[in-house]
Amino acid sequence: MKAVVIYGKEDFRYQEVEVPKAGKEEVVVKVARCGICAVDPKILHGKGYVPPIVAKHVPIIAGHEFIGEVVELGEGAKEKYDLEVGDKAIAENIVPCWKCHYCQLGLYHMCDVHKIFGISGPDGGWAEYMKYPQGSIIWKVPEDMPYEIAVAIEPLACATHGVERANIQFSDTVVIAGGGAIGLFMLQVAKLKNPKMLIMSDPLEDRLSLAKELG
């Protein structure tokens, strides 16, 4: 299959790699969509705190905002995840170790090992096929949800988590700094909290115009 593989700074390669196979409690999907997160160009250009993390795990297939169609179920995966071949399925982008202090508390998003698809752990979704390994948190996606909508589940979840942590009240003035994808998702989620005032801050006029359209 074809995939985009990270080898290092300014070294992303579109190449042929083996199609993954499903082991015990693993799921292989045919990738339908995979987004380009803001961190992906930073990895390419070696900017920010993520590239040094990725450098420890190369070569690795990029992409952590993905959605796919189930094509293979390993032993026990059907029962564990209530999946059938042909279902739409997504995995949370962190694959927890399930052994550390935070995982034992149920705070798997703070896992000490912190394996992330396409960054520090399993291969990501910039490929024709990808595998959700054992230990992944996998969700069946409704059949009637289009792939171009479902691919936004991961960034929307990030935005929703941020808004929930803010504990917005009716009397609050809420300021969202940055009108990128996450910021615009946060805007829409925060709007549902009915704050007294909702402000979007961004230096780019086109983003502010879109923010106004979204509420």
Image: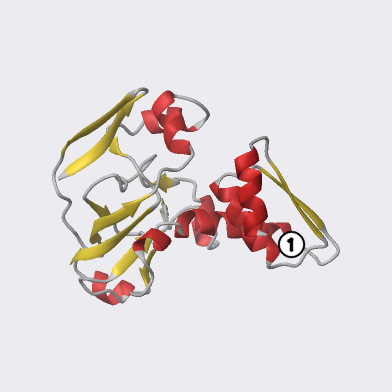
Horizontal arrangement in the rendering, residue 116 relative to residue 131 (left or right): right
Above or below, 214 relative to 116: below
Residue 74, position as x, y percentages in the image: 19, 65
Please, what secondary structure does the residue beneath circle 1 have? Answer: loop
Image coordinates for residue 196, horizontal then vertical, percent: 83, 62
Name the image quarter holding residue 120: top left
What's the image's color scheme? secondary structure
In this orientation, which residue lies closer to the viewer: 95 or 84? 84
In the displayed structure, would residue 1 be above or below residue 167?
above
The answer to whether residue 14 is above or below residue 67 is above
State whether residue 121 is above or below residue 133.
above
**Nearest to the observer: residue 150 or residue 202:** 202
Around disc 1, counting alpha carbons within 10 Å, would you say few (fewer than 14), some (14 to 19), or many (20 or more)?
few
Q: Does residue 101 appear anywhere in the picture?
A: no
Locate residue 193 relative to residue 172 in the image: left or right.
Answer: left
Farthest right residue in view: 171
The image quadrant where one finds the N terminus is: top left
Q: Residue at x 37, y 30 (%)?
A: 56
Q: Quadrant of the C terminus?
A: bottom right
Q: Which residue is mark 1?
A: 167
1 and 146: which is toward the camera = 146
- Please provide percent x and percent y for residue 180: 57, 44
Q: What amino acid type is highlighted by mark number 1?
A: Asn
Q: Residue at x 26, y 35 (%)?
A: 5
Q: Residue at x 55, y 61 (%)?
A: 105
> Number of marks in the image?
1
From the top left corner, tell me how far across and down residue 104 is, in percent: 51, 60
Residue displayed at 38% across by 70% down? 145
In this rendering, does residue 141 appear at all?
yes
